Amino acid sequence: MISCVKDKPQDIVQPQVQLTNAKKVYIINEGNFGSGNSSVSLYDTGNDAVIENFYQTQNTASPTIGDVAQSLTKINGKFYLVVNNSGKIIVCDDQFKKLSQITKLSSPRYILPITNQKAYVSDYNGNEISIIDLNSNTKIDSIPCPGFTEEMALIYNKAFVTNIKRNYTYVINTINNAKTDSIDVGTNAGSIVIDKNDKVWVLSGGDQTNNIAGKLSRINPINNQVEVSYSFNVTESPFHLCLNRTKDTLYFLSGGIYRMAISDNNLPSSAFIAKGTKTFYGLGVNPNDYTIYASDALNFNQKSNIYIYNTNGSEKKYFKAGIIANGFYFE
Amino acid sequence: MYVFTNTHVLAQDTVSLQGVEVIAKKNQLSQIGKKTEQIDSTIKEQFKLNSIADVLSLNTPIFIKNYGPGALATTAFRGGNASQTAILWNGFNLQNAMLGQSDLCLIPSFLFENIDVEYGGSSSLWGSGAVGGSIRLNNNTLFDQGLKASSNFGAGSFGLKNISTNILFSNRRFISSSKIYDSRSVNNFNYLDTTDKERPIKQQKNASYDFLGLMQQLKFLINSKNILSVNAWLNTNKRRLPSFSPLAESKTYQRDDATRITANWSFINSKFRSGVRAGFFEDKINYTDSLISLFSKSKTQTIIAENENYLTWRQHHQLNFGVNFSSSSAFTNNYESKKTLSRASVLVGNKFSFLGGKWLTYFSARAEYFSVGTLPVTGNVSTEYNLTKHFVLMASTAKVYRQPTLNELYWLPGGNINLKPEQGYTYEGSINYKTQISNVSLFISGAAYSRKIDNWILWVPGVNGNPSPINVQQVWSRGTETTWKIHYYKNKFSYKVNVVTGYVLSTVEANAQENDNTVRKQLIYTPRYTVNANFLVGYNKTALTFFNQYVGYRFTTSDNSQWLNPYQVSSLRLNYSVETKLADFIVFAACNNLLNKNYTILSGRPMPLRNYEFGITIQTKNKNT
């Protein structure tokens, strides 16, 4: 019943992986809040190889990312890894070797390139959008923006900024960095995409505590008006809106994985991929082959499962990534 | 030598009434067949300005999950989590009804005359939460002690300041005990950050605290058969919580206020004892983080009323029976509205003794009504046998449970009203050996246990990524504990060696999630190996103790893919007594983390390098000396 177990755990040996020239998928793993165990995993679509701690293997001298990696964006051939609870953005070359880091940020969430020289960074509690000079990779200015700003989208010299804590998506004139408008999309809105017709879609999760239903809104970016809005049941809290390659099909999470065509007149009545016992947390659609990537964060405290689904919903593959995988960057 | 020799008989009579309050009876029944240990009084004296978290951490196999000095400290006892340990103040469970746990850092050890650790579950006697074990904090003030007063003044590294005072007045009919305390610290401490090779010495800031409290007890011996007592413990505890990124600014403040008032009436005669007890407990937690505009207030109020009776109905049989009612209400913006959980239970048990008292057996059963869902009928069967005058064999089995907390049921979003209680069976056996060879006393104890808990509650991401608690796992905890005590006394000298070891395997046996990788893995923050050793040299009332603690690997992820390395820390504590005609003075000093080790108990929460405490106690002369 009580046989002694050797206390020292076995060191986890990273398998030697031969990468192909095929497109790579990078998985952003938040890690546990306060534990500083964020990671970036790499999946090679050519041979299905996985490197769980890719950042670590490319930066052996200083392998720690920090606390809560939130998002990954490639700008001007460099990777920008936003590390939320460490208040920084790590800038890496295309081989993921660290070049520099952007500091003086409060709790950054996402980075949106505006021009080759300039990017915006949203923030959890800074009540501002930071402006980054992409040549020097420093913060040069900020735009006051109350609330918890999240994903952003750029079209017609306008940045549309979602907000978790306010009911509005803010519109920023990217020429003079001035806030010009706010659009009522409902509370807890964190994801935004632009479809093939240049329409902006914002998904708000609602607020179960105060009995407020989530909404999916379609915005005309020319006049900043909500053209169509679909309401969810108050018991649902949809999140993680994504688009497919041809930008005509929306995907989101609400327990299971849901999808709808941008031309549909109703929200989908049932999940496209059922939740089962999984706890889907991250979602992405590979623009190269239409496959759907979803992460299952399980109990938030172990390596995530990454599921790849074919467009018909059948499971293609599953593999392990880091702790609390929240999203994907597709090459 | 008694001063009042002419009232010797009466004194005997009142002295014999010490510890006869009904709760003492329950403590005795609960520990039949189970390993139970009391913190050594000399050791306890050396921790009089520390919290019970420090006492338990260095003197028992209980792993204390401590976020740092002055910060949250909870238990991992026999592989259970914080809400699976009962923290009993004179028999009343102090666990916050919303959180299902108590912060041991906010419980100063000097408030209690006895600190006992009862290993193993006893839900049938103590109700929900007594799964891994119970920590019993008892006030055992004595009648007929006269007037005694003592004050402690302490200071230490990082701006630590401590003041506490204890005034006891007792005559043959009445006791008043007043204790007040204030413990505060700026708490900016240096630690080593091994990941930063350029600037490894860093300072933890924003962790100051100020803990203030008052405990008042009144006890009346109404007549030779009736005792009435009233206890009140009020405290207010303010602290800042540092950011997880040590260099980041933090504007997080937490204030914990508690009001605890209890009243006890005990009736005692030779065949029958009966007690009626009532308690009111209010916990307020005010948490603010102005950086993220989070202002959270919560309040829980618990009312407990119970009656317990002990009847010696045949020469070797003692029957006990009782009823208990408790109701906990919570007020917080995070619930839809005020929520209340009520419980009513009946308890019956019987103690048998055979072979002239050498063999004791006890069984009990408890049935409960619960306002939300059902609670299991629990029970226990325990036995202990004095094999020789040196050996005692003990065995116990019990059905144990923990009811879901208010937060688990009602938190918005995520609360799950359909949660079932965590429940299971626990089995244990232990053997004690004690002997006295001239000036050497030897005590060795070994225990082994096994406990499987079903419906283990875990918060996992819900439909929208918001965590929600579900009954997801089965957990099997098993292990061994040993205690070794060698004490040598000669003239006024004493030498004591105490060693306690703990070995815990606490693994997930089943998990309902697909492709989950936690099965057969050790629970997080549950070290498999702990060893605490101390060596005390005493002369008269002066004592120097060396403490050494080893804590093995702690996994930080539930698939055991990440862990923290073991740590070993040492400390020294000295008490030096000077007696004068007017008063006694005790100078005390401590050096913590003697070897300046860099360690963390929990991930990302640094612990201080070498640090010091010192102070003085002034106490009035004991009337009997």
Image: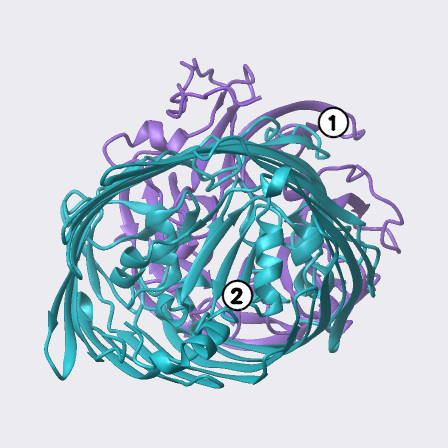
Chain colours: A purple, B cyan
Residue tagged 2: A149
Q: CA distance from mark 2 to mark 1?
A: 33 Å
Q: Quadrant of the N terminus of chain B?
A: bottom left
**Residue A174, above or below B266:** above
Q: Nearer the viewer, residue B164 or A329?
A: B164
Would you say residue B478 is visible in this rendering?
A: yes
Percent of width and height locating residue B582: 14, 84
- Dot 2 lies on which element? strand
Task: Using the image, tell me which numbered label, if any, was put on residue B371.
Answer: none
- Label 2 or label 1, whichever comes before in sequence order: 2
Q: Nearer the viewer, residue B252 or B320?
A: B320
Q: Nearer the viewer, residue B128 or A20?
A: B128
Would you say residue A250 is visible in this rendering?
A: no
Percent of width and height locating residue A111: 45, 54
- Where is residue B551, by image quadrant? top left
Tell me which residue sits at (65%, 63%) in the image: A189
**Residue A299, above or below A121:** above
Q: Does mark 1 fall on the same chain as mark 2?
A: yes
Task: Using the image, tell me which numbered label, if any, was put on residue A310.
Answer: 1
Q: Nearer the viewer, residue A155 or A165?
A: A165
Q: Chain of mark 2?
A: A
Within-10-Å neighbours for mark 2: few <14, some 14–19, many 20+: many
Amino acid type of the residue that numbered disc 2 sits on in the rendered structure: Thr
- Dot 1 lies on which element? loop
Q: Quadrant of the C terminus of chain B?
A: bottom left
Tell me which residue sits at (31%, 60%) in the image: B44
Amino acid type of the residue that numbered disc 1 sits on in the rendered structure: Asn
